Image: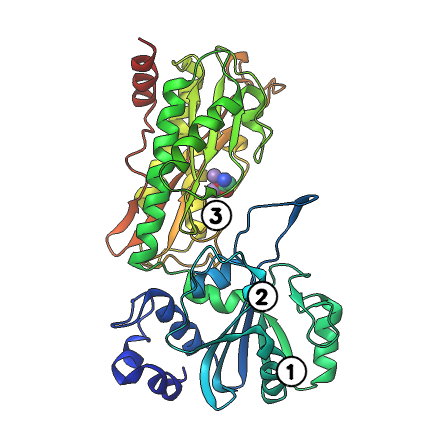
Amino acid sequence: MMRAAIRRLCGPVAATLILAQGLALAGMDEHAARRAHVLGLMDSSSALVLHSAEIQMRSPDANYRFRQESNLLYLTGENRPGLTLLIAPRGIHVGDTLAHIVLFVNPAADDGALSLRPVADGITVHIQRFHDVFAQILPEISTLYASSFSPAFMADWLNNRPMFLERESRKELEKKYPNLKVKNATPLVAQSRVIKSPWEVERIRASIAATGEGLRKAMELCRPGIREYELQAAIEYEMMRRGASAPSFPSIIGSGPNALILHYEHNYRTAAAGELVVMDVGAEIEGYAADITRTIPVSGTFSSEQKKVYNAVLHAHDSIIASVRVGMPWSDLDKVARRVLAAEGFEKFWKHSVSHHLGIDVHDVGKMDTLRAGMVFTVEPGVYISEKDTTVAPGFRGIGVRIEDDVLVTERGGVVLSEAIPREAREIEKIMRKSKR
Ligand code: GLY
Ligand code: MN
Ligand code: MN
C-alpha cells in the first residue's frame, strides 16, 4: 500500500479509509474510490494501463452496440470508445502537472452524445499526449498491468499496430525494456471488483428486478404453441422498459430437448404441451448484470416426474443458500449440491458447477476461494436427463431443470437478491393458471 502516495492524493482521512475495501470513501465519488483502492494495491514500480473496448463491426456500416471493457468501466463508469486510463503510484508527469491518475480522451472516437466526467482525483487530457507520457513512464517501472480484453484493442504505440497482451508485442515491449514485465490487469483490478460496494449492489438489484418482471411476464404468456423467441421478446421488453441497456448475456430460452443445452441461444423452437422451458436470462443496468433462471411447464402444470426433479433441484438450491457463511470455502457450495442431489437420486444428471461471481460481467472476475462479505454470486444447480437415458423411467427422460438466483454474502449469511422472483413449483403454476383464465 502506497500510503504516502494516497495521502498526497486525497488527504490523510481518505488514506486511512482506503484500507477498508468496499467502502465508498468519504467525500469521493464511487469511481474515484475504486481508483484509489486499486492504486493502493499497486507497488511504486508498477503502472496500470487500460484502453476502451474496440468498436466491433457487425456488417458493413453497422456496428455491434458498444460495451466498455469491464475493468475500465469499473474504474471510470464511462461507456464510450477512445479512452485510455493510466494509473501509476510513482506519479505521472504531464507537462508541469504530476498526477497518479491520467485519463486520456479521444473526442474523435465518440459521437459526443454522452458527457464525460473528468477525473477529479487526477487529470484528463487529450489522447495526443499518451505517446510521450507513456514513453516517459515505461523505463521507470518493472511491471505494466494491461488489459487482456482483446489482443487487437490497443494501438501499438511502438509500431502503430495492435499490441499489448498480444504475445508478440508484449515480448517486443519486454525486449525493448528488459526490466519490464507486462502482466494481465484483471487479477489486480479483480481484487477490488470481487467485493461489491452498496452502490454496486443497488445496480445489481435493479437488474434483477427488471429480469424478474420479464420472467413473470413469460410465465403469464407461456402456453403450448408459443415460440421460444416470443418468450425471449417478452422478457427483454420488460427488462428494457425498466432501463436495461441490453441483456447481460444472450437470453437462453430452451424448451423440451433444448432445455438440456447449457448455452442454447437459438430460441427458435415451438414449445409443446407437456414440456418444460428453461429461461436463463439477465438484464444489464448501468453496467451491472443479473443472471436468473426459471424452469416452467409449458402447459402450466408440472407432471409428477417433472415436479420430482424440480423439487430435488430446488432442495439443492435452498440447501446451498442456507449454507452460505463468511469464511466458507467456495468449493463447499458444490459439495452441498452434490450431497442433496445424491440423496434425491439425481447426482449423475448434474453437469456444471453451481456458482460464479456476478457483477459488471455476468461471469464476474475474482478468485473463487473463500466467501467474503460483499461478494455477489449465483446459485444455479441443475439436473439434465437425456431423452435417450434408459436407466430412468420414460416419464423422466428429456427433463432439464435449472434454478438460478443471485446471492449477496453478508456477515449474517446469504441474502437472496432475487428472492421476489417466484421459484416454488406451486407459485409458478398459480401465476400460469391465473393468466389463462
Ligand atoms: N447465464 C449463464 C450462466 O448461468 O452462467
Ligand atoms: Mn444463468
Ligand atoms: Mn449463471
Q: Position of residue 260 (x, y in %)?
A: 56, 27
Q: Position of residue 379 (x, y in %)?
A: 41, 42
Indicate the quadrant containing the C terminus: top left, top right, bottom left or bottom right. top left
Which residue is under mark 3?
362
Q: In the figure, residue 292 lies in which quadrant?
A: top left
Comes first in the chain, label 2 or label 1: 2
Which residue is under mark 1?
180
Q: Position of residue 194 (x, y in %)?
A: 42, 60
Label 3 within 8 A of ligand 1 by Cβ: yes
Q: Quick check: 225 above or below 314?
A: above
Q: Nearer the viewer, residue 244 or 272?
A: 244
Distance (Cα) linking label 1 and label 3:
33 Å
The structure residue drawn at horizontal position 45% and vertical position 44%, both measured from the top left corner, is 245
- Using the rendered image of the protein, determine whether residue 354 is visible from the camera's viewpoint: no
Q: Quick check: 164 above or below 197?
A: below
Distance (Cα) linking label 2 and label 1:
16 Å
Which residue is under mark 2?
147
**Label 3 amino acid?**
Val
